[in-house]
Amino acid sequence: MVVVFGITQDVFSQIHISGFISDSLTGEKLIGANIYIPQLQKGVVTDNDGYFSMIIQEKADINISFTGYDSKSIKVNEPMNKQFHIRLTPGKELEGVVIRATKRATPNMNKMTMKEVLSIPSLTGKPDVLKSLHMFPGIQTQSEASALLLVRGGSPGENLYLFDNVPVIYVNHLGGFMSVFNPDIINNIELYKGGFPAKYGGKLSSVVDITQKEGTRAKHQGSFSIGVTDASLLLEGPIGDKATYIFTGRKTLFDFLMLGATALSDGNGSLFAYGFHDFNGKISWRPNMKNSLHLNFYQGDDYFNYWIKNNEYSTEENKNRINTSWGNWLGSLHWKGVFNSNLFAENVVSFTRYRLKNNQESAYYWADTLAYSYDNQFHSHLQDISWQSNWKYNPTEFWNIKFGLKTSFQEFLPSEEYSSNDNTLREFPSYNTNETALYLDNNIKLGAGFSADAGLRVVKFFTDTEIPIKLEPRLSLHKQFGNQEISMSYMQTNQFAQLLFTPGSIASNEVWVPSGRYVTPSSTEQYTLNWNGSFANGGYQAEASIYYKTLDNLTTFREGFSSLRGSAYWNTKVASGGTGTSYGLETMLKKTSGDWTGFVSYGWSKTTRQFPFLNNGEIYPYEYDRPHTASFNIRHNFSSRYSFSASWVYQTGTPYTPVIGKQLTASLYPNDNGEYDYYEALIYGDRNSERMRDYHRLDVALTVNNRNAEGKVKSAWTFSIYNLYNRKNPTYYYYNTNNTGEIYNPSTYTGSNQDYTLRQLSLFPIIPAVSYKYYFDVKGVKDWTFPKRLRDWLYYENK
């Protein structure tokens, strides 16, 4: 009672200041804007909603600034709580301005703006959100050009992807080579590698928090872009005085080209086409300064189609088609409200669905008579319906609280298959689960530069068997020395949905299974020691981290299985009980001002796995263990028209299991003569005991901006070169008796004893690419005179 009374008395003597910072022209909320009080030498920055809240003890002058905008000052003359909606006007880049009391760098978290994403060269000439995160230390790739994230020894299914605070289940296109996130609609990206705030849970390795843009309130406008792989369109504008919209669409171009090329090819006996699309939309309504509603939706699909071509001169006819499609549906409704100057809330209702479908149809005709037909269908899905309520409360100047609740109802269908051979539908069980979590986060300033973040997440998972309540403590301790800070963090988290992932195919092989009777929840503990600092008035930023991470009850396929398809139930093909460790060092140096900007990073790590049913139960290097990773990115603006960027990445080669010999093995079933054939079988050595060649490449890009009389970009050309020095990086290794490129498959032993040699497949040589982006407004399109000029020119003789 004494403590509560003291806090209450302190609250009455303080001034609470809160509000939103936005762009004065578009209304877009500014994330990371600085709110600074010079006489008190203190400040805060806006969060992902453009919202800020701070407490002062006296009247003060407040400076508000954001890079690329004119700064603004306001006065607080009355000892009463204030709420502001501050609009900054776009202006020149801030030069020579020093913000000395901005929010400290968050340990274990890397932030990337869309300006930085756009500056990183890419394979297709257009930016990719997830691939840009590979430049950070502690992030590794699965294979050449892959967008999959492997964070601090984790697997692809251990990352939580949030799109405006709503989970996205499937995040890649083109077999992992591109991400589903269209950069045209993204505002900000935050990546947590450890030390998660208590708000986040359900995944072991990372949190990728992506914030979408809101539509502009200034005018109806848009952009169109086209590159090597796809074309995209963006439309945005106001709806009345208090609402805005933004819609984006993206579609591949090469699926039609692939279909046409295979149809015209005489030497090819099949037709095939692959493509994908994405559609995003967001409608925002702000009835007043304190409340807002946001309706979001997303739909994206990949699809692969294959047909057999028939010889028109043959009496035989084969009808064979394979269709595989996979993707996401997402919809959400957000309400955000400010109750008073120190209490902010967000409530979200969301629906997410990921599904994988495969259909195979075959028919064989002889002289117009059906001789044989076959139909096989496979289906798997994961559906999530969630509600969450997140709150922020600032009771005193030294204590900030975040708390909330989230409950998710999930439906898992790991495997469902129909086969016309036995005319039965094998309906494997579906599982309905519920995951409910309560969380509390405290940020406490202890004085003398010390502060602490202490949180707890309480999780209950309801499934087909009893799973105890899980407690997930989070703790971070910080000590600030001027512009430098040292911090230590500890966290626990659990994962109840396990991803069974099979790499190596353009079609999705991702299937999710729930924890329960057959699979135990996986868990992790992570310890981190971090240092960060800024120098030269903030022109240089540096950080270094050491981490140690343990993983328990991991799940994977049993030996000999790589898919859930087949006659057996899915639980007979997987097993849990695996453990893992990962530890390492990460460093990064960024230059944020001057003619040349960029960063350089290096990471060292070691990651192992151990399963009772793999490698004789012995510890082995993880499939994606890459001890050394390094990267750099440089950017230079020659003028307002021309800019240049270059990126270089290096990673140690991934482990593989070598072949140490071969032997003859009898077939399982006799042939037509009742005899058993013999096959050559390879004898493998210790699991992951050898490594592929190291991976490295250099990418460069040149951007040419065309500006109007007001200095705004109207169109942009980007010319890029992927793998500039044509490094032949390995995609995978295989064994063969010749250099034809055919992958070895066991065949009947014929007495020839040829030697098999190890060979490498490389996919991406030096690749030039070009993309074009054009910005327009609706009035400009309506007033476009080109069609009229063309018509006048065509019919000039008739005038």
Image (cartoon, rainbow, N blue to C red):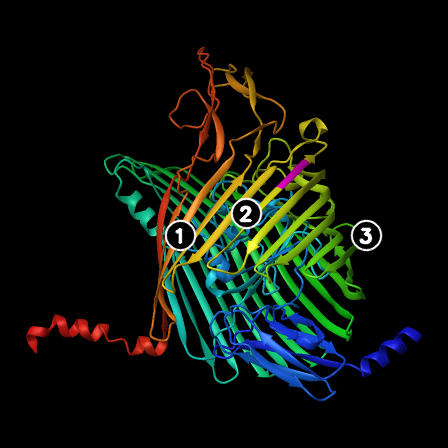
Name the N-terminal-most of marks 3 and 2: 2
**Mark 3 and 2 residues: CB-CB less than 8 Å, in contact?**
no
Mark 3 → mark 1, Cα distance in angstroms = 53 Å
Q: Position of residue 367 (x, y in %)?
A: 29, 36
- Residue 225 falls left or right of residue 46: left
- For marks 3 and 2, give the one nearer the viewer: 2
* SS for dot 2: loop
Front residue of this view, candidates 201 and 195? 195
Residue at x 57%, y 41% (from the top left corner) = 629
Residue 295 in view here:
yes
> Where is residue 621, by image quadrant?
top right
* SS for dot 3: loop
What residue is disc 1 on? Answer: 701
Residue 607 drawn in magenta: yes
Residue at x 9%, y 74% (from the top left corner) = 796
**Mark 1 and 2 residues: CB-CB less than 8 Å, in contact?**
no
- The amino acid pointed to by label 2 is Leu
Instruction: State the extent of the magenta-drawn residues as a range.
Output: 604-608
Q: Where does the C terminus fall, quadrant-wise?
A: bottom left
> Where is residue 167, by image quadrant?
bottom right
Residue most extreme to the top: 751
- For marks 1 and 2, give the one nearer the viewer: 1
Crowding at dot 1, Cα within 10 Å, few <14 / some 14-19 / many 20+, comes out as: many
- The amino acid pointed to by label 3 is Pro
* Main SS class of the magenta portion in the image: strand
The image's mark for residue 148 is 2
- For marks 3 and 1, give the one nearer the viewer: 1
What residue is disc 3 on? Answer: 468
Mark 1 → mark 2, Cα distance in angstroms = 23 Å
- Residue 729 falls left or right of residue 564: left
